[in-house]
Image (tube, coloured by chain):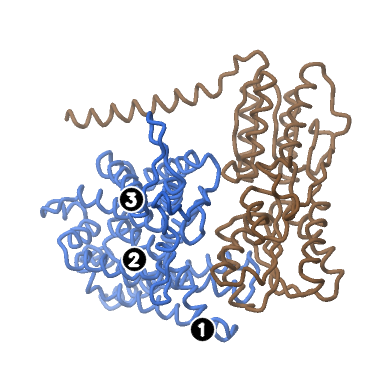
Chain colours: A blue, B brown
């Protein structure tokens, strides 16, 4: 009867936590990471140095935070191409507010303190995420198209706000009470850069959301089979909007961290980072069709990409090879899983006959 | 149901608004007609200065302008040239996307009877564009490298940040740097990384090179943005005072870094002068048919160090 074991298994997506195959894929990503670490530590004695591990993890953290947001969207069978632009836009908004924002009609200039800057920048990301969600969930526009459009809109706004300039006066002024942007958002509590702490915090919070809340169960359910989920009472539209809001929020957080890290708000910031985030999610064993994937896998995926890219620079591989190798690793990481699936299916057909 | 219509109506209004805006910007009712300005990326301060200068000069001379950016993509460049031809513009000011790739696009406009004036970068064919006004990158990079060599004390280990490999200027500058540096036996290039003219990439690559070579003493960068990224990495590593950084372009942030002693020197590309010249030559050609005296025009770059940095703002040295 069961002619397509593949399909049947995917409809079990609600049990993603216990999915044996997802687990195996995760192990595979972990093996890939181990290979990368061993390979580079053999080629460079600098690779495993503590300072280098912290540096590479900071680079990974930016992508990992984006990837966590991306994971939520992909779990629901969507995609969010706008995150890179939202990174740039929220970073530019933070930079703009730190320079002083003219209040319309009053001729005065507001210098919000850094927490207000943070909140407004995050709200910008949330707002764009919400617009993505409305376009996808209410207007039924394909996520690829809606977020592709938003990629250009958000990037355009970032360039409009800066008028092509780069904002570099981020230190604030003690007389205006807006100091501390750099010291706070590029801080190193316990010697570990803030982005790494944020990555850890986001990973914990989003793991709890996915595994312990109704929203998490709804997400896995509607990602696995939206129609069935809707019939069983899952508020599919609400879930669909919320994931884009959360993705926008993650992107905005990266935007603020990035701006503080670079000591400059540049409108081009975060360009193409949506692709790295998608790669991390996919390497982490998440199905692009939705319903299957974990935060843990996504983090491992982000480390695979980040350590690979940084390791290649560290051993001095030419930039053209860096890109080629990165692409090949993404393909191999996913191909291995598909090959395993095909073999499994053949074996089942054989044993059935 | 009503809600659904509201959403659709809002979307329709938005779409109308957008097309309305697009319609305004392409009107060419002005007496002088329209000049199309096609640049690389106005989000970069250098190209922003180019665009602002071109628009201001053309507006002063009584022309309408359209501005487009191809982002070094020859396919996009061709689209913008096609659009300019069908809009019937009077002249095109173009910062070309690649020396070989742009010949066809310029030829197309010339065949359609529209004069093309190139600024900032050149194309590999002559006699197609009316003028090719470029800053003398090799001369500028030589000046910069000489100053940097002096600051290094005539020897040392250094790394290089290379611009976008498809951009001819990246190679021209690097070659001129090395012509100066490689002639001196005391210098050793530890690593060369591409950072695509970009500040964030410059910082990331510099952070990693600092891990690989903690003893590096100098950085040569193909432009200011990459140099500024390197400076941020050095600042975070507490090595800013020990490492000599060389930039190129003369943008405002780099000038501030030169004044603060964080950057040894940068090289000003007289992009404002060059762009003004291009628009003025286009105007002369349109009014009485005077062609520029020579097609290839090189404008010398100016070395910017602590001594003269104070007088530089917005790519203009006073």
Q: Which residue is mark 2?
A: A286
- Same chain under badges 1 and 2? The reply is yes
Mark 2 crowd level (few <14, some 14–19, many ≥20, 10 Å Cα): many
What is the C-alpha distance between the residues marked 1 and 3? 39 Å
**Mark 1 element type:** loop
Disc count in the image?
A: 3
Nearest to the observer: residue A151 or residue A8 = A151
Q: Which residue is mark 3?
A: A116
Residue A221 appears at what percent x and percent y? 19, 60
Residue at image position (64%, 56%) is B257
Q: Position of residue B99 (x, y in %)?
A: 75, 45
Q: CA distance from mark 1 to mark 2?
A: 29 Å
On the image, numbered disc 1 is attached to which residue? A48
Identify the subunit bearing mark 1. A
- Label 1 crowd bin: few (<14), some (14–19), many (20+), radius 10 Å: some
Disc ID at residue B273: none
| Residue A6 percent location from the top left of the image | 29, 66
Of residues B161 and A348, which is closer to you in this image?
B161
Where residue A292 appears, as percent x and y from the top left, is 28, 65
| Apparent side of residue B68 relative to residue B247 in the rendered image (left or right) | left
Nearer mark to the viewer, of 1 and 3? 3
Mark 3 or mark 1, which is nearer the start of the sequence? 1
Picture residue at 67% right of the left edge, 33% below the top: B53
């Amino acid at each position: 009867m069961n002619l397509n074991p593949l399909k049947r298994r995917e409809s079990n997506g609600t049990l993603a936590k216990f999915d044996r195959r997802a687990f195996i894929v995760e192990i595979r990503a972990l093996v890939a990471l181990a290979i990368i670490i061993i390979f580079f530590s053999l080629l460079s004695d600098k690779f495993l140095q503590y300072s280098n591990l912290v540096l590479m993890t900071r680079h990974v953290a930016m992508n990992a935070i984006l990837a966590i947001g991306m994971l939520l969207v992909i779990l629901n069978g969507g995609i969010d191409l706008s995150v890179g632009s939202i990174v740039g836009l929220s970073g530019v908004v933070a930079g703009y507010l730190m320079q002083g924002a003219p209040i319309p009609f009053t001729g005065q200039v507001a210098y919000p303190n850094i927490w207000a800057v943070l909140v407004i920048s995050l709200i910008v990301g949330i707002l764009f995420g919400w617009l993505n969600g409305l376009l996808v969930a209410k207007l039924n526009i394909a996520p690829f198209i809606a977020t592709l459009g938003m990629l250009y809109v958000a990037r355009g706004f970032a360039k409009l706000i800066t008028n092509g300039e780069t904002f570099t006066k981020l230190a604030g002024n003690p007389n205006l009470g807006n100091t501390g942007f750099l010291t706070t958002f590029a801080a190193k509590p316990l010697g570990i850069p803030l982005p790494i702490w944020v990555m850890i915090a986001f990973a914990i919070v989003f793991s709890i959301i996915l595994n312990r809340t109704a929203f998490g169960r709804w997400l896995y359910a509607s990602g696995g089979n939206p129609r069935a989920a809707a019939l069983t009472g899952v508020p599919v539209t609400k879930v669909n909007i919320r994931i884009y809001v959360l993705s926008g929020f993650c992107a905005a957080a990266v935007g603020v961290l990035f701006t503080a890290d670079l000591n400059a708000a540049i409108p081009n910031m975060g360009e193409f980072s949506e692709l790295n985030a998608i790669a991390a999610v996919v390497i982490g064993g998440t199905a692009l069709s939705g319903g299957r994937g974990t935060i843990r896998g996504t983090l491992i995926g982000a480390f695979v990409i980040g350590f690979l890219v940084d390791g290649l620079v560290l051993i001095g591989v030419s930039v053209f090879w860096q890109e080629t190798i990165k692409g090949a690793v993404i393909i191999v990481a996913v191909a291995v899983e598909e090959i395993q699936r095909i073999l499994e299916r053949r074996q089942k057909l054989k044993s059935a006959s | 149901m009503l809600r659904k219509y509201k959403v659709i109506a809002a979307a329709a209004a938005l779409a109308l608004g957008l097309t309305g805006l697009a319609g305004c910007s392409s009107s060419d009712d002005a007496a002088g007609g329209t000049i199309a300005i096609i640049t690389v990326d106005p989000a970069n301060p250098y190209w922003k200065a180019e665009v602002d200068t071109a628009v201001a000069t053309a507006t002063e001379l009584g022309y309408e302008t359209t501005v487009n950016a191809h982002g070094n993509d020859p396919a996009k460049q061709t689209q913008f040239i096609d659009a300019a031809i069908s809009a019937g513009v009077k002249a095109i000011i173009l910062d070309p996307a690649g020396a070989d790739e742009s010949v066809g696009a310029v030829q197309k406009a010339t065949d359609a009877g529209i004069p093309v004036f190139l600024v900032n970068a050149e194309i590999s064919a002559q006699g197609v564009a009316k003028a090719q006004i470029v800053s003398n990158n090799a001369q500028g990079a030589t000046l910069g490298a000489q100053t940097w060599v002096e600051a290094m004390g005539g020897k040392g280990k250094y790394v290089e940040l290379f611009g976008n490999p498809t951009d001819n200027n990246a190679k021209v500058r690097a070659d001129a740097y090395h012509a100066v540096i490689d002639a001196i036996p005391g210098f050793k290039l530890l690593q060369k990384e591409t950072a695509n003219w970009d500040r964030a990439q410059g910082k990331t690559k510099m952070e990693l090179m600092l891990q690989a070579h903690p003893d590096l003493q100098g950085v040569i960068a193909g432009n200011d943005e990459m140099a500024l990224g390197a400076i941020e990495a050095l600042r975070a590593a507490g090595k800013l005072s020990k490492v000599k950084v060389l930039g190129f372009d003369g943008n405002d942030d780099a000038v501030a870094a030169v004044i603060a002693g964080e950057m040894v020197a940068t090289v000003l590309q007289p992009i404002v002068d060059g762009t003004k010249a291009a628009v003025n030559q286009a105007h002369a050609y349109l009014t009485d048919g005077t062609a520029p005296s020579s097609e290839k025009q090189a404008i010398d770059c100016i070395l910017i160090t602590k001594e003269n940095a104070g007088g530089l703002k917005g790519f203009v040295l006073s």
